Image: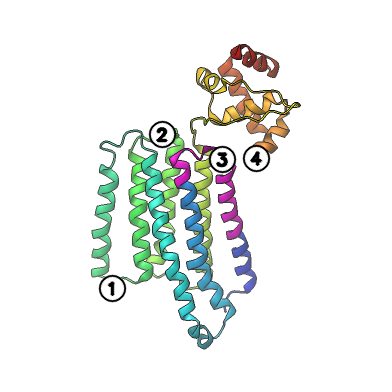
Amino acid sequence: MEIGRIYIWICFIFCMALAAGGVLVMFRHRHYRQHAAFRYMQYYLILMYTFGFYAMWSQLWFRVLFFTSESYSTLAPVVNFLVSISTPFLITGKLMLVLWAVSLLENKRNAFFYPVGSSVVLLPVLLYWFSHSPESQPGVYQLYVMLVWIVVAFVGSLLLFSSIKYFDRSSKLVMAALVWVIGAIHIPLFLNGVGEPVYELLFIFLYFLSHTALGVCFGYGATLPPVQEVVVVSAEVPSVPATFEVFMERYGITAREAEVVREICRGKANKEIADELFVTVQTVKDHTHRIYQKTNVKSRTQLASLLREFEK
């Protein structure tokens, strides 16, 4: 092979790390599981990672392990079987992405004009391209890319032109851009431009990277409403008021800021809070500053006193 095994191993390790990171981000926010959008995104990432390992890495590893065309051709049915069983993961995953986008809508009435229009227009364009190309019949790769593009056109347009929940304007644009990036990285595959091993590795890496980026941006960019949760209090940890959710609504505290308030109530320092929430110390300081502004206090002591008074 023209590319050494070392590069393939490096790419494989990075892809595994990206997949693990995307799943861990979802489990890090598992207390938001009651929200449909969170569940759909979690299912989507797991299904897409599974499809990536079954359909993409299986073919590449079989070619690496069996160098000669004769030995590889004898195992072609095994590779085709792995690709075939990955198809349900692909279809179900794309359905989860559509449901995720729909669950974000604030008003579903008249929200599907641009998404449906862009998806419907895309299909005739692709069919026209095939009718004027040297290969009149689309291959498996082209059919796969067509499915991805139709879903991306629908979801991307939905995020771009519709009013959605849990995101401000800038976060919404980032999410829409990431969805379009997932579609854009498939352009070389549609044009049969991923024949060389180095380009194939690059495509697989970008596939995992783009999906992980989408999950991370959703997990940390969305402002999901607070959830009802039971707080187990030990003798060493100060109790959190039972009316904590009402306190958040009264002062407009976001879910992420609420996590910081809880940790402050437990007497933790900024470094401890940062380690607990997997963020930087500066991020904790920024959240704390906004909390002080919203509650009109100047210190942790005043914040804790305000909470106690609110409970009374």
Distance from Cα at disc 2 to Cα at disc 3 = 17 Å
Q: Which mark is residue 86?
A: none
Q: Which mark is residue 29?
A: 3
Along the viewing direction, whichever of 179 and 103 lies nearer the viewer: 103
| Disc nearer the start of the sequence (2/3) | 3
Q: Secondary structure at mark 1?
A: loop
Eye-nearest disc, 4 or 1:
4
- For the stretch drawn in magenta, the main secondary structure is helix
Q: Which residues are magenta?
A: 15-40
Is 291 placed left or right of 195 in the picture?
A: right
Quarter occupied by the N terminus: bottom right
**Disc 2 marks which residue?**
165
Res. 290 in view: yes
Res. 183 in view: no
Where 71 falls versus 107 (above or below)?
Answer: below
Q: Position of residue 184 (x, y in %)?
A: 41, 56
